[in-house]
């Protein structure tokens, strides 16, 4: 658990919340058994203090939620709402892709009072599910992104269901189409959690404590739902002695191999055998082209990129031009590579992939290739920088098919037939 030094006023227990069914590693529901769960306890007041002291962007996000500017538009999402959501890692859309949504009233929201509370009634469940489904239809808006947008309009009703919260409250990946089953399961789990043991009473006390001293959070109020969200996030995020720094992460050797997300190690899942075949088939010709043209380095394997002081990523492949070689460190590349290539795999959860691509945008990676063998498709995305400092990716090219030819403009003169890349003969291999 994150440790901080309480003052005299905080010498009491801190109102502990218990999370009785935490998924040790988020996965699909049909892959879970009792061994996949554990109990975690969170010191509520200490976690709230830590969050609003250390997570500057999260505090800034919350202040805008309660601002007059936001409250003036209770039923529509403004451009500022999108920029605000990006502060807590809601990324992946383009403004071009969501322009029909910006500044338009959502009739689903208009049916819901602004003070509707998830813990007081379930009569608005259908309406909020419908509103979130509307957002989900837009490209780049996954479950977590939709929640981070609509929470700003109904902060007592809409939970922020990122991967950490889902893991803490037992909302696994579901194989059903759409997001309605995920949302309804989450509403049930959150209500059950409040009614578990002393959680409800302690949550009330934490809410009273927050309201009694606005200096703690910087806002005049914080809903019980948002408090529970933060504590659920903290149940996964917390690590003894505080977050792991990027330099310490860089020193780690595998296996297993990890990425660094908000100061917490996130183990990379094992990919199927065909993933390694695809990696070799694509890297070989591309590496040769880069070397022949003396353009720089193509790296892969487990080469690491620094995103921030507590964040780091391990792309499948990335390109370092000669002009950026001075940013290569002992264990990390400390700059923004102009190109990252991700080979998509069945183990990649959509929300986690969107979060990873969002990190690349925040870092300033100019171009991302998503190589999707199951769909026989390569998509090229280019970074677009906006006036409000938010950067998003826009798809500029899609090459699809068994025998299509990929000619990336990033490397003039390079081309490769996808029939030479796709590991088709290994697609359905089994180990038994």
Image: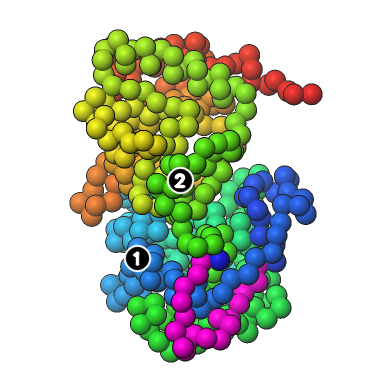
- Mark number displayed over residue 249: 2
Q: In which quarter of the image is residue 423?
A: top right
Q: Which structural element holds mark 1? A: helix
Mark closest to the chain's N terminus, 2 or 1: 1
What residue sits right under mark 1 in the picture? 56
User: Counting other residues with Cα less than 10 Å from the Cα at mark 1, is it few (<14), some (14-19), or many (20 or more)?
Assistant: few
- Residue 299: x and y in percent read 40, 26
Is residue 14 shown in magenta?
A: yes
207 in relation to 399, above or below: below
**Which secondary structure, mark 2?**
helix
Task: Identify the residue at horizontal 47%, vertical 80% (top origin).
Answer: 6
Relative to 430, is 86 on the left or the right?
A: left
Q: Which one is in front, 190 or 310? A: 310
- Looking at the image, is mark 2 or mark 1 nearer the viewer? 2
In this rendered view, identify the residue nearer to me: 45 or 352.
45
Query: Could you say where residue 247 lies in the image, as x and y percent from the top left?
Result: 40, 46
In which quadrant of the rendered image does the N terminus lie? bottom right
Gap between marks 2 and 1 measured at Cα: 22 Å
Judged left or right of residue 363, residue 139 is right
Rendered image coloring scheme = rainbow
Q: In which quarter of the image is the C terminus?
A: top right
Could you tell me which residue is drawn at 37 percent across and 84 percent down?
A: 214
Residue sitting at x 44%, y 63%: 150
Contact between labelled residues 1 and 2, with CB atoms less than 8 Å apart: no
Is 113 or 141 nearer to us in this picture?
A: 141
Q: Is residue 212 above or below residue 423?
A: below
Horizontal side, residue 406 vs residue 80: left or right: right
Which range of residues does the magenta coloring cover?
2-19
Q: Residue 231's x, y, as percent?
A: 54, 69
Specify whether residue 176 is in view: no
Q: Which residue does the image show at 42% across and 52% down from the upper left?
A: 245
Inspect this view and state whether residue 334 appears: yes
């Amino acid at each position: 658990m994150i440790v901080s030094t309480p003052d005299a006023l905080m010498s009491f227990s801190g109102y502990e919340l218990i999370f009785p069914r935490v998924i040790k590693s988020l996965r699909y529901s049909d892959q879970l058994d009792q061994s996949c769960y554990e109990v975690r306890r969170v010191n509520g007041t200490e976690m709230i203090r830590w969050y609003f002291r250390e997570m500057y962007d999260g505090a800034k996000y919350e202040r805008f939620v309660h601002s007059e500017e936001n409250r003036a538009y209770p039923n529509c999402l403004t451009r500022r709402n999108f920029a605000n959501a990006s502060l807590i890692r809601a990324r992946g859309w383009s403004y071009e892709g969501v322009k029909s949504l910006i500044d338009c009233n959502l009739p689903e929201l208009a049916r819901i009072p602004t003070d509707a509370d998830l813990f007081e009634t379930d009569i608005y469940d259908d309406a909020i599910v419908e509103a979130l489904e509307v957002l989900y239809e837009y490209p780049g808006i996954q479950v977590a992104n939709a929640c981070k947008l609509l929470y700003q309009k109904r902060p007592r009703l809409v939970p922020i269901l990122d991967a950490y919260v889902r893991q803490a409250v037992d909302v696994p990946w579901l194989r059903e189409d759409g997001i309605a089953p995920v949302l309804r399961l989450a509403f049930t789990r959150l209500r059950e959690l409040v009614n578990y043991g002393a959680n409800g009473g302690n949550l009330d006390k934490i809410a009273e404590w927050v309201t009694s001293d606005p200096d703690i959070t910087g806002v005049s109020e914080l809903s019980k739902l948002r408090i529970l969200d933060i504590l659920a996030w903290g149940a996964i995020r917390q690590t003894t002695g505080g977050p792991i720094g990027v330099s310490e992460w860089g020193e780690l050797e595998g296996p297993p191999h990890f990425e660094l997300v908000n100061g917490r190690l996130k183990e990379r899942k094992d990919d199927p055998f065909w993933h390694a075949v695809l990696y070799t088939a694509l890297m070989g010709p591309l590496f040769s082209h880069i070397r022949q043209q003396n353009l720089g380095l193509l790296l892969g394997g487990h080469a690491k990129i620094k995103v921030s002081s507590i964040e780091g990523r391990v792309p499948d492949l990335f390109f370092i031009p000669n002009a950026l070689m001075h940013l290569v460190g002992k264990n990390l590349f400390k700059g923004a590579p102009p190109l990252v290539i991700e080979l998509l795999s069945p183990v990649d959860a959509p929300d986690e992939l969107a979060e990873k691509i969002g990190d690349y945008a925040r870092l300033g990676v100019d171009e991302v290739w998503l190589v999707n063998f199951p769909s026989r498709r390569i998509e090229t995305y280019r970074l677009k920088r906006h006036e409000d400092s938010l950067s998003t990716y826009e798809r500029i090219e899609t090459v699809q098919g068994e025998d299509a030819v990929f000619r990336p403009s990033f490397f003039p003169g390079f081309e490769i037939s996808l029939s030479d890349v796709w590991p088709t003969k290994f697609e359905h291999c089994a180990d038994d």
